[in-house]
Amino acid sequence: MSLDPQNEQEHAATLFTRWSETALEDRLMFFRALPPREAGDLFFGLSTHEQAFLIEFLSTSEKRIWLRALAPDDTADVLQSLPVDMRWNLIDLLDDSARFEVAGLLAYEEDEAGGLMNPRFPRIRPDASVREAISYLRKQAHVNLESLYYCYVLDQSQHLLGVISFRDLIIAKETDTVRSRMRTDVVSVNEKMNQVNVAKLMADHDLVAIPVVDETGRMKGIVTHDDIVDVVQEEATEDIHKIGGTEALDVPYMDTPILSLIKKRGGWLAVLFVGEMLTASAMAHYEEEIASAVVLALFIPLIISSGGNSGSQASTLVIRALALEEIRLRDWWKVFKRELVSGLILGTILALIGVIRIIAWENIFHSYGEHYLKLALTVSLSLVGVVLWGTISGSMLPLILSKCKLDPASASAPFVATLVDVSGLVIYFTLAKLILSGTLL
């Protein structure tokens, strides 16, 4: 989609909704044509990757303006999305205090609390009066405070002593001291804590911001709810991609080059293809049985798809439950028993449907011959066995991977389905040899 860069009547909200439809080469020209206020609305509404795209191709003076408009933590996120050789040149465009803050944030890993935090936060002294604290905060809010949810009480060495909400500070008596109004049971996180654990802690305590401290208790910054929203979206997206049998994309789908998409998907696809070769090997092993009773081949897709589907369901449920900490590794036996019962019931339901179908088709079309009842028994028992095996293997595999310190999401639905396909054929033809021996076989 190409947009007219001279049309300044477009509002930022409209432009934002059309942004992803705009050709990459038109975005920069389109952005520059906007009035300053609307350009700001659009810029701050874009994702980090889209902001980085604009920054990369703007002029030096434009880079300076937009980088300085961002909060330090947002600036660090943008720089991390750009090539390494560009980062330090861009840092030089910041003012001295921002340069120091951003460089400090870049020293942390992206998925650490230190990499998420904003080093600018409301801080007050414990011995200050409420009146003095409010006056100080009012001045600071005009200068460098992005958010004002809680006020953090620090000593001269920047150790975190307590916290007071802005609401409590406003309604307190002006002559009260901050120390008399603050809470000392502060929930905080270490600067090295993983972002997923930070998000869980904030959710558990229903916080909109959480302080980040170092090993000695010195406060380094705050992680706010908007940062956590991004974390949750990023982690959920990564898990969904893995469950779908592909590597996580680093940038939005429409901005990912075709070659990169192929690289992300090709590896897993090749692994799954090799796995499916085992299915062909299993069928070759039972070639004589298939040749003797061609009717058995008619139900192969039914059998393996039922097992794969049940396994995919189970793995998806368990992966999500692990992510939400609804279950833990120690709960594996409880999960096993639940899936055992579920697999038996689900397999029985499909088996009954299969039997009804075979009997109905035989009576209407005479499709399966005089031994159709034994065939129905074979198919029904196979469905119970395959669905049972699918649910158990699909539920246990994520737990096994988690035990091995691997990402449970790697137990993707396609991977589980491929695993169950091979074992499903073995179950099917083993039962066929037992039940149909002396008749069809």
Image (cartoon, rainbow, N blue to C red):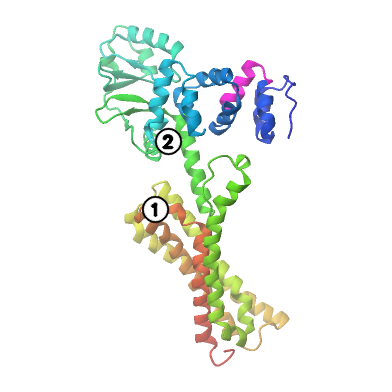
Q: Name the front one of labels 1 and 2.
A: 2
Q: How far is the residue under mark 1 from the one under mark 2? A: 20 Å
* Dot 1: element: loop
Which label is found at residue 406?
1
Q: Residue furthest bottom?
A: 438
- Quarter where residue 189 is shown: top left
Of 243 and 109, nearer the camera is 109
Look at the numbered disc 2 and give the secondary structure of its residue: loop
Q: Main secondary structure of the magenta part?
A: helix
Q: Is residue 58 left or right of residue 240?
A: right
Q: Amino acid at mark 2?
A: Glu
Q: Is residue 98 above or below residue 16?
A: above
Q: Residue at x 40, y 25 (%)?
A: 103
Q: Is residue 263 left or right of residue 187?
A: right
In the picture provided, is 77 more to the left or to the right than 108?
right
Q: Does residue 41 show up magenta in the picture?
A: yes
Residue 325 lies, with reference to residue 274, above or below; the image says above
Disc 2 crowd rating (10 Å Cα; few below 14, some 14-19, many 20+) is some
**Considering depth in this image, is 297 or 251 the residue closer to the camera?**
251
Expressed as whole percent of the image width and height from the top left, the position of residue 412 reads 49, 56
Magenta region, residue range: 33-45
Magenta stretch: includes residue 123: no
Q: Which mark is residue 347?
A: none
Q: Is residue 314 above or below residue 295?
A: above
Query: How crowded is the residue under tag 1: few (<14 C-alpha within 10 Å), some, or many (20+)?
Result: few
- The quadrant of the image that shows the N terminus is top right
> Which residue lies under the disc numbered 2?
110
